[in-house]
Image: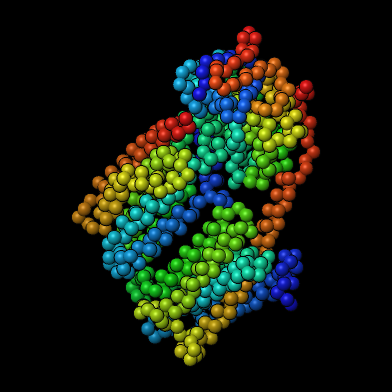
Amino acid sequence: MFEDLSFSLEGGSALVVTGANGIGKSSLLRTLAGLVSLAHGSIRLEGGAPDTPSEEHIHYFGHQDAVKPALSVLENLQFWQSFAAAAHVSGFSGSSVDPMDALNLLGIGHTARLPAAFLSAGQKRRLSLCRLLVTPRPVWLMDEPTSALDRVSETQLLGLMNAHLAAGGLIVTATHSDLALEKTLILHLRAGDAAAPSPEEALQ
Amino acid sequence: MSTWALALFQRDLRLSVRVGGSALVGVLFFLAVVTVIPFGVGPDLNLLSRIGPAILWIGALLATLLGLDRLFQADRDDGTLDLMLMAGRPLELVVLIKCLAHWVATGLPLVVAAPLLAIFLNLEPAAMGAVTLTLLVGTPALTLIGAIGAALTVSLRRGGLLLAVLVVPLAIPVLIFGVSAADAAIHDPVPFLTPFLILCALSLIAAVIGPIASAAALRFESD
Amino acid sequence: MAFWDYANPTRFLKLVQVVLPWLTGLCVLASAAGLYMSFFIAPEDYQQGQTVRIMYIHVPAAWLSMMCYSIMAVSSLGTLVWKHPLADVSAKAAAPIGAAFTFMALVTGSLWGKPMWGTYWVWDARLTSVLVLLIMYLGLMTLWRTMEDPIKAGKAAAVLTLVGALNLPVIKFSVDWWNTLHQPASVMRMDGPTIHPDILWPLLVMAVAFTLLFFVLHLMAMRNEIMRRRVRTLRLRAASAAHPRSAVATAQPAE
C-alpha cells in the first residue's frame, strides 16, 4: 500500500494527513492502529509501558461510532470507560474525565438516560468522541473527525484536540477541512511516486 | 480484570434482552422444532418417548447454531470489534465472556424450556431430568464451538447458514454423548455417569479451544 | 358513537377512564358468581368426580384464546385497510393476553388429560392446532419486540396475523374433521347445546367473566401502549431539543 513512508512525531504535536480520496489516508490510520498488519517496517511508541503493544496506547476515532442503539447513552460510555484500558507514556498528563462530565462537555448531557437509538448522527458522533475523554490514552487517531458535526461542535472538537496536545498527547488525523491545531505538521499523500513526508525532519 | 469483564458481560446481556435483542427467539424456535417432529414421524407416543431425548438435543443444537451468527457480527458492523481489538484486554477472555453472556441469554432459556417440551414428547420424569441435566452441561459446549464458526464468518453478509455447516461436524461428539447419557438414564443397564462425564469434559475442552480459535480468527479477520 | 370518534387517542383514553371501573366491577362480580357456581352448585361428574371442575376454567380459556385472535385479526384489517390509528395498538395489546389464555387452556387441558387419558399430552388435531396458535401468539409478540419503529412493526404484524387467522377454523372444526381424543363441541352447535343446564349455566357465567376479564386487560394494555408511545415521542423530542451548550472549560480558542 505505502512505500518509503516514514515519519516521527513528538509529544504535544499533531500530524494532519491530507491527500485525494482513495489515496489511503484511512488505511494509514488503520495501520497505525494495529488493525492492519505491516508488510515491512515498524511502528514504535517511546516511553510507553513495556510489553504493551503500541495500539493499546491509541484511541481510534474512525467512521463508525461503535454506539449500541439499545443501550442508553450513559451505558454506552460507561462500558467503554471500564472496558478500554487506560495507558500512559512519559510526558503525557491526560486524565480520566467522568462520563457524565464528558457528556455535558459535548452538549449531550441531557440525553444521558435515553437510548442511543434516539440520537441524531451528530449526537452519536459526539458520544463516540466522549469515549476518548473517559479513558486517557496518549495517541489519538482521528479519521475525518469533523464529519457530521455542526460548526459549534467542530469548534468544541478543536478545543478538545488542542487540550489533548497541551497535555502532551499526540494526534494523527486525516481530514479535508482546515483544522486550526497548534503545532501541526502536514503529511501529504500522493499517488504514483513515493509519498512525500514534507516536514518530517522539522520536528526535532 | 473483574471490572471490565463484568462490564462486558452486563453489556452483552443487556443487548440480548432489550428491544431488538433475540434472547427468547431461540426458545420459540426450539418449541417450533419440537412441534414439527411429530408431524414428520407420526403422533405415536411410545415412539416419541423413545426418540424424545434425541429430538430435544437436535432442537437445542439448531436453536443454538441459528442464534450465533450475530455473536461477533453485530460488533463488527458498527466498529465495536476494532475497538475491542485495541482495548488492551486479552481477546481470548473477551470471547469467553461474550460466549458466557450469550449462553446465559440464549442457552439457559433452552435448558429451562426443556422439561416443558419433554411433556410434549411423553418423557418419563427420570428421562426429563436426565435430558435437562445433559443440556445444562452440554449447551455451553455448543455455544463455545459455535463461536469459532461465528468468528470465521464474521465478515460474511449471509454467514448464518455457512456457520451451521461449519460447526455441525464439530458439534457431533457433544450430540453423541449428550444423547447417550440421556438414553442411559432411561435404560437401566447402561451406566449414565460415563457418557455424562465425557460430556462435561467436552464442555471444558470447548471452553479452552473455542475462545483461542475464535480469537485467532477475529484477529485475521481484521486485517 | 362512531368508530372514528375514538381514533383520537386522547378521547379514547378519556373513554377508558370512564368505562374501566364499571367493567372491572362487573368482571369481579361475574368471576365471583361463576367460581361459586362452578365449585358449589355444579354437580360432580359420576365418572370424573371433582376433576370435571377443571372444565369451568379450561373451556372459557380456550374460547377466549380464539376470540382474542379474532379481535387481533379484525384489528389487523383496521391497520391495513381502514388505517385506524388505534388498530395496531389494539392488536399489539391483545397478543400477550391471548397468549396467556391459550397457555391457560393448554395447561388446564393437560392437567385434565392426565387423569382422563393417562397422559399430559397427545398429538391430536385439537391440541396441536391450539399449540400452533400459542406459537403464533409468541411469534407475533417477538416480531413487535424486535422492531424498533411501532408503525412498521404494526404493519408487519398485521400481515402475519391475517395469514395466521387461517388457523382459527382449523382449531374450531378440528374435533369434527379428524378423529381425536378430544371430545366434540357440545355447547356451540347448530342444533343447540347437548349438555345439562346445571353444567351449562356455570360454564356460561364463567365465559362471561373471562370475556369481561379480557376486555378489562385489553383496555388497560391499550392505555399502557398509548402511554408508552407518548413516552417514546417525548424522549425523541428530548434528545433533539436544543440544549444550552455549556462553555467548554478545557477548550482553548481555536485560531
Image quarter of residue B11: top right
Q: Nearer the viewer, residue B119 or C167?
A: C167
Q: Is residue C251 left or right of residue C78?
A: right
Q: Is residue C172 left or right of residue C224?
A: left
Residue B144 shows up from this direction: no
Q: Which residue is rendered at x = 59% and y = 58% of the image?
A: C153
Q: Position of residue B37 (x, y in %)?
A: 35, 63
Against A153, residue B69 (above or below) is: below
Q: Nearer the viewer, residue C134 or B76?
A: B76
Q: Position of residue B149 (x, y in %)?
A: 40, 41
Against C91, residue B111 (above or below) is: above
Q: Position of residue B98 (x, y in %)?
A: 47, 40
Q: Is residue A171 left or right of residue B50?
A: right
Q: Which residue is rendered at x = 71% and y = 38% of the image?
A: A108
Q: Nearer the viewer, residue B24 or A150?
A: A150
Residue lying furthest left in this view?
B189
How many numbered marks appear?
A: 0
Q: Nearer the viewer, residue B165 or A55?
A: B165
Q: Position of residue B65 (x, y in %)?
A: 40, 48
Color scheme of the displayed model: rainbow
Image quarter of residue A84: top right
Q: Which residue is rendered at x = 47% and y = 44% of the image?
A: B157
Residue lying furthest front in this view?
A192
Residue A175 shows up from this direction: yes
Residue lying furthest top in this view?
A204
Against B140, residue C120 (above or below) is: below
Q: Which residue is rendered at x = 70% and y = 35% of the image?
A: A149
